[in-house]
Image (cartoon, grey):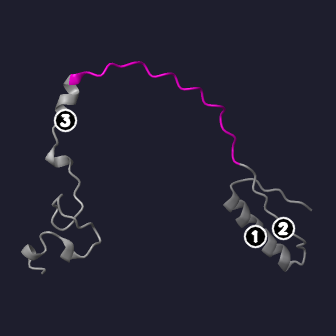
Amino acid sequence: MVVKIAGDVASVRAAVMTGAELAERQQGLVAQKVIAGPGRPAAGPCPAPSPAPDVAVTEENTALTDAPSHSTERVTCNLCLDPHCPRQKGDPRSQCLHAGKRGDA
């Protein structure tokens, strides 16, 4: 007898294992096999993207972004939060620029 079970792979495997254990107790199990089928096919090919429209860049916006902002500097030290500190998170505390000022010398 062949039993076909459809569903997601984990559920099918659990059902087959349960059935196989029951059949072994009755000395009726010959073989068991779970064949996972492919997933659902894609809906179809994606349409080609439309070309982006030409947009003129104005100089007004670039003048505002040329000035460096203090808030955009990347902080690497999680102890002193000084962007000029060479210490990175995970490094020894002694490598922090402000290590002596905290009393950790």
Q: Of helix, strand and loop, which one carries label 3? A: helix
Taking the view exactly as shown, the residue that stands out farthest to the right is 1
In the image, residue 85 above or below residue 8:
below
In the image, residue 54 above or below residue 72:
above
Provide the major secondary structure of the magenta segment. loop
Point 17% across, 48% down: residue: 71
Point 65% across, 34% down: residue: 43
- Residue 93 placement, left or right of 25: left
- Residue 44 placement, left or right of 20: left
Q: Amino acid at mark 1?
A: Met
Distance in Å between CA atoms under marks 2 and 1: 8 Å
Q: Amino acid at mark 2?
A: Gln
Residue placed most toward the observer, 88 or 44: 88
Q: Quadrant of residue 61?
A: top left
- Range shown magenta: 39-59
Point 78% across, 62% down: residue: 34
From the image, tell me which residue sits under label 1. 17
Quarter of the image with the C terminus is: bottom left
Quarter of the image with the N terminus is: bottom right
Say the numbered circle drawn on residue 32: 2
Residue 16 screen position, x and y as percent: 77, 66
Q: Of helix, strand and loop, which one carries label 2? A: loop
In the image, residue 46 above or below residue 4:
above
